[in-house]
Amino acid sequence: MVHEEKMMRDVYCECLMEAAAKDDRIVVMEADLMKATGTEPFFLKYPEKSVNVGIAECNMVSMAGGMSAMGKIPFAATFTAFITRRAFDQITLSVAYAQQNVRLVGTDPGITAEINGGTHMSMEDVAIMRSVPTMTIFEPIDGTQLKKAFPQIIDYYGPMYIRLNRRTPAKIYDDSYEFQLGKADILKEGTDVTLVASGIMVEQALLAAEDLAKEGINAEVIAIHTIKPLDNEAIIASAKKTGAVVTAENASYLNGLGGAVCECLSENYPTPVQRVGVKDHYGEVGFTPFLQEKYHLMACDIVEAAKKAIAMK
């Protein structure tokens, strides 16, 4: 599958600069990771709209809540482990409970933290943020989607967690794509099994669908960019059509996308579900291809899960 030429963090910075040129409410906040996050060009161009709090993530989130209370739209970014685990109390109280309009950006989700290893590899970030009332969780799949989504990200009011892959993603969308926050994208229609995927696992789901087709199994592929609130209508409609579902995510399979889909279906249309994700395990040092194989986050794992789900019908 073709990958994009531009890194997601570069697209993120370009979107921020374009938005800041039109909207004085935009503020970019960093915990001394401007190079890693890719926002260094923004800091150079808009120093008056930039805040580096240093290695003080909890303070950054509290400050972001205060800036929102003054009418700003702060984008506060750091590694997923630090924005979710470390600053969880500030997210809950200073942002969500206070009903503030803050964008919390977690970079290097799941195994894409790579050589930063287990301490920086937050497999549980989606589960953490799903538990916060009123929190929206958005994970762009490629740079085109991120660019299309950015105006809606700005216009939306409320706390939002953006799960941002810094690196070069597979190219899933083209310029004709129309984004809608909270609505799933059906990338391929099918009749035998539904593959529901987010982030880097969308590429693997599409590859799995190709492999399943060789065995006469027609898979539907649904790309989820808004993990919360989940597009329940799309999930239920597809489950009614195929009768079997597989979820695939670059995160813990507990309480993340897989958990959300299981909750949706058990309460509305009970359907066999198999979950592909990190199975209750910490991360470790390694590059993405190695970690995908180790944690069973590959197309072949989705194929195996699909066959199990189908057999449960």
Image (tube, rainbow, N blue to C red):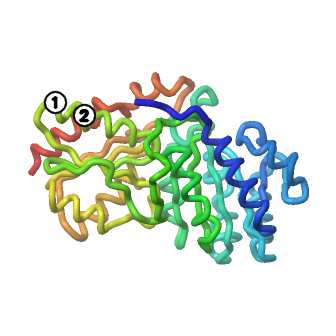
Horizontal arrangement in the rendering, residue 182 relative to residue 216 (left or right):
right
Identified at 59% across, 35% down, the residue is 167
Closer to us: 12 or 276: 12
Asked if residue 118 can be seen in this view, the reply is: no
Question: Which amino acid type is shown beneath numbered disc 1?
Answer: Lys
205, 247: nearer the viewer: 205
Residue at 15% x, 54% y is: 242
Q: Is residue 303 above or below residue 128?
A: above
Q: Residue at 42% of width from left, 48% of height from top?
A: 198
Local packing at callout 1 (Cα closer than 10 Å; few below 14, some 14-19, many 20+) is few
Q: Position of residue 76 (x, y in %)?
A: 72, 56
Q: Report, in whole angstroms, how far the alpha carbon at label 1 lies from the one at label 2.
A: 7 Å
Viewer-proximal residue among 92 and 237: 237
Q: What residue does disc 2 label?
A: 210
> Residue pushed farthest right?
48
Residue 214 — which label? Answer: 1
**Looking at the figure, which quarter contains the N terminus?**
top left
Residues at marks 1 and 2 touching, judged by CB atoms closer than 8 Å: yes
205 left or right of 158?
Answer: left
Relative to residue 174, is residue 100 depicted above or below? below
Query: How many numbered tags mark residues here?
Result: 2
Secondary element type, mark 1: helix
53 in relation to 266, above or below: above
> Where on the picture, by quarter, is residue 34?
top right
Q: Secondary structure at mark 2?
A: helix
Q: Which percent across, then down, holds residue 95?
A: 67, 69
Residue under the image location 44 percent in, 67 percent down? 229
Q: Is residue 10 visible?
A: yes
